[in-house]
Amino acid sequence: MIVRWESPHDYVLVHIHQDMFGDWIFSRTWGQIGTQFGGLKHQLAESREQALMWLDDVDHIQRSRGFRKVLETHDDSPEGRDAVRQLSLLE
């Protein structure tokens, strides 16, 4: 699952996925739109439910900061594949 929020100048993107060992990974990227400024953080969740709880927390925080959700998709959609490709450029 991939979710992206944007403000006029900034973005936050969350990617929830399983690795090859079956562990749930919660990846969060943030930065300024159109620049290389930003960051990337990976967290190991105990379960998919915990990762979804973290996603709800990020959603609440971003909406309170004036961000709006612009994308919510799965990894296998064209939009999801494009978002994952952008994530790999940050590492």
Image (tube, rainbow, N blue to C red):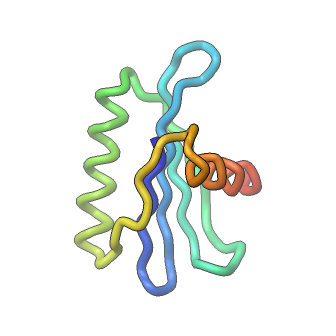
Residue 37 location in percent, x, y?
Answer: 66, 73
Task: Give the camera-side residue of 88 and 43.
Answer: 88
Q: How many marks?
A: 0
Task: Give the camera-side residue of 2 and 23.
Answer: 2
Q: Is residue 27 left or right of residue 37?
A: left
Residue 69 vs 27, above or below: the answer is below
Residue at the (37%, 34%) spot, across then down: 51
Residue 75 location in percent, x, y?
Answer: 55, 40
Residue 80 vs 12, above or below: the answer is above
Residue 42's quadrant in the figure?
top right
Q: Is residue 17 left or right of residue 84?
A: left
Residue that extends furthest to the top in the rendered view of this protein: 21
Residue 91 vs 48, above or below: the answer is below
Residue at the (64%, 17%) spot, across then down: 20
Q: Is residue 64 left or right of residue 55?
A: left
Residue 56 vs 23, above or below: the answer is below
Quadrant assignment for the N terminus: top left
Residue 16 location in percent, x, y?
Answer: 47, 38
Residue that extends furthest to the front in the rendered view of this protein: 78
Residue at the (76%, 55%) spot, across then down: 89
Residue 79 location in percent, x, y?
Answer: 57, 54
Task: Give the camera-side residue of 65 and 78.
Answer: 78
